[in-house]
Image (cartoon, rainbow, N blue to C red):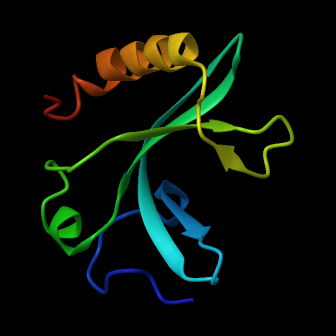
Amino acid sequence: MKKPFENDDYIDEDIITILDENKNPFYFLELDRIETETGKYIAMTSMDEESSENEEEYDEVIIVKVTADGKALIEIKDETELKEITELFEERLSEKYDLE
């Protein structure tokens, strides 16, 4: 399978591929993952042409929860849970990336 960008330096394990309802692939770069008492979470950003050229500048960080069976990523609907997890990721990622 072809990588999303010809000259990228990303490790394959850092790329998450999500298929939409029409089986079109969307690529995301995993920025970090954490595990807490409430579950496992992944922070990622969309891999478009601009982010592949300058990995330090991302449009948006997306945080998702990993299902208990580890087979799917789901939206965090509980506002308190999302706030707590977002704060954890902000603290961890602020050292590595320029977060606004």
Q: Is residue 43 above or below residue 72?
A: above
Q: Is residue 64 above or below residue 86?
A: below
Q: Is residue 6 left or right of residue 18?
A: left
Q: Is residue 61 left or right of residue 59?
A: right
Q: Is residue 44 left or right of residue 40?
A: left
Q: Is residue 59 above or below residue 5?
A: above
Front-lying residue, 13 or 68: 68
At x 59%, y 39%, the residue is 75
At x 13%, y 60%, the residue is 54
Front-lying residue, 4 or 76: 76
Task: Name the quadrant containing residue 46.
Answer: bottom left
Q: Is residue 72 left or right of residue 86?
A: right
The image quadrant where one finds the C terminus is top left
- Spot occupied by residue 66 in the image (x, y as percentages of width and height): 69, 39
At x 31%, y 21%, the residue is 90
- Spot occupied by residue 13 in the image (x, y as percentages of width and height): 54, 58
Task: Name the quadrant containing residue 50.
Answer: bottom left
The image quadrant where one finds the N terminus is bottom right
Residue that extends furthest to the right in the rendered view of this protein: 69
At x 79%, y 44%, the residue is 70
